[in-house]
Image (cartoon, rainbow, N blue to C red):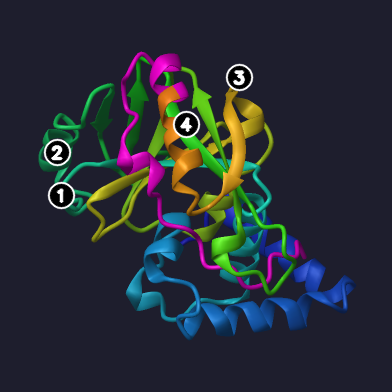
């Protein structure tokens, strides 16, 4: 299988990092081992990128890309929300089946699928404001997930590229770089589509004050405010109860 240009650039960058930075190899090796041992939930890893089983275990390049995403997620740079579609994606060549599934997305979302091996697999769009969350971990490297601080944001109407099923780590990082708005991920085996939004690329507005995860009273206040801002659309427990990333070490290498 030939490498994409972006994959080659990524490998060159990580290879140089391993030579020039004495801390890089131990950090990435430790993270790679943690990923392969299941310290990070597979559903979370598959949302970031999904490795084809025949390519085996996560490698140092996967670890580096995951570290970039995890750092941005746990420092509030990436906002996210989850859209329930109720069905896992079909194989990439099942264009009609995947496109039909996307036709059943809840309001205000719609989507299209065309698949293929180049560029994106489709798109997801919404025509009214939606709610997304960011989370920041305040306790350092050994933080308990219950201690992270949640902030809700109203995201204006927009479009994201859709990536379905297997996705190389280099493509995941491509969607994180400056100037990109993010990506909608529908991994194999998932009945949800995850919108991962680079917050600095959207004219997003804060909703209420930030609060500690699990504070139900604050969630209800935010929910009421957001319902007014978004005209009552797409504000429900699906947003409020997003699954959290496992926290280990989110030091950017």
Residue that appears at 42% across and 36% down: 220
Q: In what element is the residue under mark 2?
A: helix
Q: How far is disc 4 from disc 1 in space, using C-alphas?
A: 32 Å
Residue that appears at 19% across and 34% down: 102
Q: Is residue 131 left or right of residue 204?
A: left
Q: In what element is the residue under mark 4?
A: helix
Question: Could you tell me residue 77's position as x and y percent?
Answer: 65, 42
Residue 82 appears in the figure: no
Is there a contact, CB below 8 Å, between mark 2 and mark 1?
yes
Q: Which residue is mark 1?
A: 87
- Mark 4 or mark 1, earlier in chain: 1
Range of magenta residues: 225-253
Residue that appears at 40% across and 43% down: 240
Q: Which residue is mark 3?
A: 203
Q: Is residue 135 left or right of residue 13?
A: left
Question: Could you tell me residue 192's position as x and y percent?
Answer: 28, 48
- Between disc 4 and disc 1, the foreground one is 4
Residue 101 shows which numbered tag? 2
Q: Callout 1: 10 Å neighbours few (<14), some, many (20+)?
A: some
Residue 111 appears in the figure: yes
């Amino acid at each position: 299988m030939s490498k994409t240009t972006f994959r080659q650039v990524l490998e060159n960058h990580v290879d140089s990092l391993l030579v020039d930075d004495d801390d890089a190899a131990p950090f990435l090796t430790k993270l790679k081992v943690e990923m392969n041992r299941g310290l990070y939930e597979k559903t979370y890893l598959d949302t970031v990128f999904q490795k084809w089983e025949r390519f085996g275990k996560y490698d140092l390049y996967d670890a580096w890309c995951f570290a970039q995403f995890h750092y941005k997620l746990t420092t509030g740079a990436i906002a996210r929300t989850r859209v329930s579609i109720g069905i896992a994606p079909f194989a990439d060549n099942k264009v009609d089946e995947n496109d039909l599934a996307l036709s059943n997305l809840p309001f205000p979302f719609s989507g299209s699928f065309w698949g293929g091996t180049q560029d994106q697999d489709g798109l997801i769009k919404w025509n009214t404001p939606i709610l997304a969350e960011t989370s920041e971990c305040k306790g350092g490297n050994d933080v308990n997930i219950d201690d992270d601080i949640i902030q809700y944001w109203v995201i204006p109407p927009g479009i994201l590229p859709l990536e379905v099923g297997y996705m190389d780590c280099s493509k995941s990082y491509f969607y994180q770089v400056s100037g990109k708005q993010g990506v909608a991920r529908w991994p194999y085996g998932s009945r949800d589509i995850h919108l991962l939004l680079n917050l600095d690329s959207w004219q997003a507005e804060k909703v209420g004050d930030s609060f500690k995860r699990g504070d139900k009273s604050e969630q209800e206040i935010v929910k009421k405010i957001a319902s007014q801002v978004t005209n009552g659309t797409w504000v429900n427990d699906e947003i409020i109860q997003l699954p959290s990333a496992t926290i280990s070490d989110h030091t950017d290498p």
